[in-house]
Image: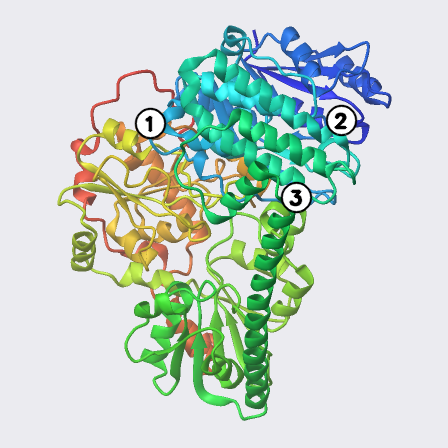
Amino acid sequence: MPRFSVIVPAYKVQAYLHACLESVLSQSYGDLELVVVDDCSPDACGAILDEVAARDPRVRPVRLRENAGPGPARNAGMEAATGDYLLFLDGDDTLAPGALQAIADRLKETGEPDVLVHDFGRVDRTGERLRDEPAGQLTERGPAPFRLEDRPGLLRMPPAAWNKACRREFVEREGLTFPPGWYEDTPWTGQALTAAESIATLDRVCVLHRQRRHGALRSATSERHFDLFEQYDRLFAHLDARPELAQWRPVLFRGMVDRLASVFRCPDRLPRGSRPEFLRRARAHYRRHRTPGGGPLPLRARLRHALVRGGAHRTYRALLLGGRLARRTARLAARLGRAFGSAALQLHYRVQLRLPVREDRAVFAAYGGRGHSCNPGALEAAFRELAPHIRTAWIARPEHHHTVPPGVRRLTPGTAAYWTALARSKYLVDNSGFERRPVKRPGQVFVQTQAGTPLKHMGLDLRERPAAARGTDFGRLAGHVDTWDYVLSANRHTTLTWERVYPGRYTTLEYGYPRNDVFQQATSADVTRLRESLGIPPGSVAILYAPTHRDYRRTRATTLDLERVLRRLGPRFVVLARAHPAQPGPLGEAGAGTARVIDVSDHPSVEKLCLASDALVTDYSSIMFDYANLDRPIVIHAEDREAYEAARGTYFDLRSFPPGAVARSEDELIDIFATGHWTGSRSAQLRAAFRERFCPYDDGRAAERVVRRVVLGFEEADLPAVVPLEARHPVPSAAASFARSPLATVPRPSGPLSVTDRS
């Protein structure tokens, strides 16, 4: 019996079917059967199915003698299925890489629920991937599995079969089948969710759903959209037959009204002349299935209900037109105001460009307007110390102004002072690209510090990674690179990567990263003070957990259950949970259920967090290269390596050259800390080799070398010599003595743990 039965109805999708089937068969999780139902398709779908089935025994063809539609075709697939869980794909959809492994892991983690709801992405007619609004209902925080009462908002998500995995025994027990018609998913979804005794969610895009091309099913202009009425009759009849489900009538009733109003309002759904009849039937359905309750309705929802309830489409249209006119007038006035202000600022900027460059001015920015941090922050401080004749300014949005040190001028992006600084400052220093690209003037010096050693693909290498590139204009990027005079690098790997993915005429300064200077300059008193400010209990082992963002996720959901990890390790461990700034919101489980998880996502200095911690747990984040300078334990948690590689790609296999122990699951991570392997000799050997390769120049004087070369005009031979690795003495962690003692190990967690890779 396979774990998954993936059911695919195929009808007139010959251009997409092969990619659909390959996306399933190429999954890293192979315990599956692929049930493909040829719905008497008149094109080449049958031939494609024969070809794929001939070379892969996991493909099970089912052929219908006459076209039945997607609902009956799925039913035929379910009759042939033998897997534990049923998944559904349309013939032009695809499974995301690593999706089945993620679903299998989540099912196991949540105790085999009846239904698992996962996220999906849309692919438009051009092949571009589109993101829906964040599906907050799919958060993995909180207890799981749960019942629908705990998260009723799932009923407001798109009623689709292809964003769910359903336990086959549950489907058979409830007698769930798909009805015929265009909107067959509507009653299926409602019945499945309301009948499920256990539900779980997975906050990950597992299916890429192709937007229907012109003339296909629900995007077509047809009277078959009247099928919605029959489908909702089926759904409410199901509720009537089961009085225990009556509590779900209000939310399903609201969903029906919204759906009917949406079809009516869409200009190309209903044929001309059929709209009055559609509205008449919508009014009848409103009265037939009306269910009070559910709380107050917002204004736009009340308008939709008024449309369907009274059939007053002329009044409704008048109200809509009036509202649109008012909004357009307000938007036009706002645009005119912005246009006038923008024109005035551009005129101001052009005037400033004609005035002399100020030799004693430098302007800095980091991460597109965030606070005083990273390499630009360290360089700004070095400018003030080593070149005090240079007046410095920092560009930051108002909410980050408090991070700018006293004596440094604060600049808000888009203001006249901002444009003046960009036009007339001699030195412009940034780590990611100024929020609004300035003109490069003769006499100006642009220093691109970058934001870390690259492990994941960057720059021009993202041309083959559309999910990660996110619409990057590579021509504009090349033009931006042409303005750089200097680019910072911490090691030879970084130098070679930058010069290939950001080709330009700049000079590479292989001096180390200025932000890492603090690791060689800090004292034990500094570490103690930092730990006290973060609330780390004395004597605790503080683990800094800092995962990078995922291009296939929309939220900061972590792959670790931090509460469970700490529960297994015991009271001496705490976690500093640091989310990646590219994805807003809390970090998954951080802060949930235990005071020993300290959410430090908003802390302005990641370097201070490194100093305060005793060990680092990360995945593919460049923080590992910086942290290695502290010569403290690093543990890699690479649970979703295949998915990350597919979405983003890396420059080398981290497992073959890691900075410490590597865990491929949460249990392996727990075992690494529980047995003391995180501080063992093998981990120390790996870290030493990693430091030798990636930390040759981070000796505490990187910022000084940059300032002396770029600002003070020193020759290379006159710069401070690099301190060898063996002569460096970074500040030790607060728990270093504890980590070296026999108490570093804690009682081994009960239950089977398999650590198959500790290198």
> Disc 2 marks which residue?
18
SS at badge 3: helix
Which quadrant would the N terminus be assigned to in this image? Answer: top right
Q: How far from the left and from the top, in percent, is residue 681?
A: 31, 35
Q: Residue furthest bottom?
A: 355
Does label 2 or label 1 sit earlier along the sequence? 2
Residue 209 on image: x %, y %: 65, 34
**Residue at label 1?**
143
| Location of residue 183 with respect to 405 vertically, above or below | above
Q: Nearer the viewer, residue 39 or 492?
A: 39
Q: Which residue is mark 3?
A: 265
Q: Residues within 10 Å of mark 2 (few under 14, many from 20)?
A: some
Residue 619 in percent (x, y) is at: 43, 40
Q: Is residue 320 visible?
A: yes
Tell me the CA gap for discs 3 and 2.
36 Å
Element on which disc 2 rests: helix
Q: Quadrant of residue 589?
A: top left
Label 3 crowding class (10 Å Cα cut-off): few <14, some 14-19, many 20+?
A: some
Disc 1 residue type?
Pro
